[in-house]
Image: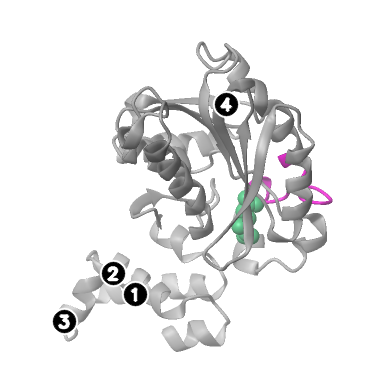
Amino acid sequence: MSEAFTHKGLESPRLMSEMLLSHVLGCQRLRLYMEPDRPATELERNNLRDLVARALKHEPVQYLVGEAWFFGLAFAVDKRVLIPRPETQVIVEYVLQHARNTSGFGGSAGDGVLLADVCTGSGCIASSLLFSMKNARAIATDISPDALAVARLNAVRQGVIDRLDLLQGDLLAPLAEHPIARSHGSLHYLVSNPPYIPDSEWDAVEPNVKDHEPAIALRGGPDGLDFVRPIFAGAAPLLREGGLILVEVAAARAEEAEAIARSTPGLRDVRILRDLANLPRVIVATKSA
Ligand code: GLN
């Protein structure tokens, strides 16, 4: 199976094979190595054959097994949402570190902290942050009611639904209706992984992404900044002094996105964070006084 995946040019063939196999056998991946000789039943073999055939047609394995890992947590995923990517963890890690090290930002439990996650999708950023900051609250927005249904499921799964408000609407618009966020200067953090693939890069996107993940969660217009611009433009008034905005962007557009943030009134200390592949990936800025 692993060789067939390699041959088709699928990413992480061995991991993908293990994910499918453990899914079909209903066990954890480690057990595959503990009982290497257990014969599979006919039903298991048929299920596996079916899933492998679909994976070879570039259906993402995370959709086939209904799950993706992010920040050490298992999130439910299906074709209604973008599959969480490891690079997005940069946002979660940065916020947690900032909260721990900055007085007035709630410490490691996030006491009194209010976050907004715009374009939440599966809810992986908001739920991971609330999972780690046990006393923080969050508002997550998405234009897609389908995505919000998945985000809700995941917030229940991670035990954070009591501290999360899920709101449907375009970018920052739902925040203007929220009883707390609408009073200016209430947010400690505004985070977002908006759709950001530029039209010019769309043709080159891998088939597992382009043909199966929701285009609405991926495409960011001609330069990939169609959503990045209005998020920066509207964020400053919502943030409290010293609060942070963190937005994930296309690596090739990071400098332009940085320039947008620098020219936004009310923001200071604009910087770029690199992801695990050392690509410029997240623009951070601080709300000025
Ligand atoms: N990182 C994703 C990809 O390149 C894009 C995610 C996004 O548009 N927010 O496949």
- Say whether marks 1 and 2 touch (CB < 8 Å): yes
The span from disc 2 to disc 4 (Cα, nearest Å) is 35 Å
Which mark, residue 38? Answer: 3
Q: Earlier in the sequence, mark 3 or mark 2?
A: 2
Q: Earlier in the sequence, mark 4 or mark 1?
A: 1
Q: Residue at x 78, y 45 (%)?
A: 259
Q: Quadrant of residue 39?
A: bottom left
Q: Is residue 20 left or right of residue 203?
A: left
- Say whether marks 4 and 1 touch (CB < 8 Å): no
Residue type indicated by callout 2: Ser
* Residue receiving disc 4: 168
Q: Secondary structure at mark 4?
A: strand
Q: Is residue 116 left or right of residue 255?
A: left
Q: Is residue 208 left or right of residue 161?
A: right
Q: Secondary structure at mark 2?
A: helix
* Residue receiving disc 1: 18
Residue range (magenta): 215-228
> Where ligand 1 lies, by quadrant?
bottom right
Of badges 3 and 2, the one in the foreground is: 2
What x and y, as percent, mark residue 237? Answer: 66, 20
Relative to residue 49, is residue 190 depicted above or below?
A: above
Q: Residue at x 69, y 66 (%)?
A: 205
The span from disc 1 to disc 2 (Cα, nearest Å) is 6 Å
Residue type indicated by callout 4: Gln
Q: Quadrant of residue 138?
A: top left
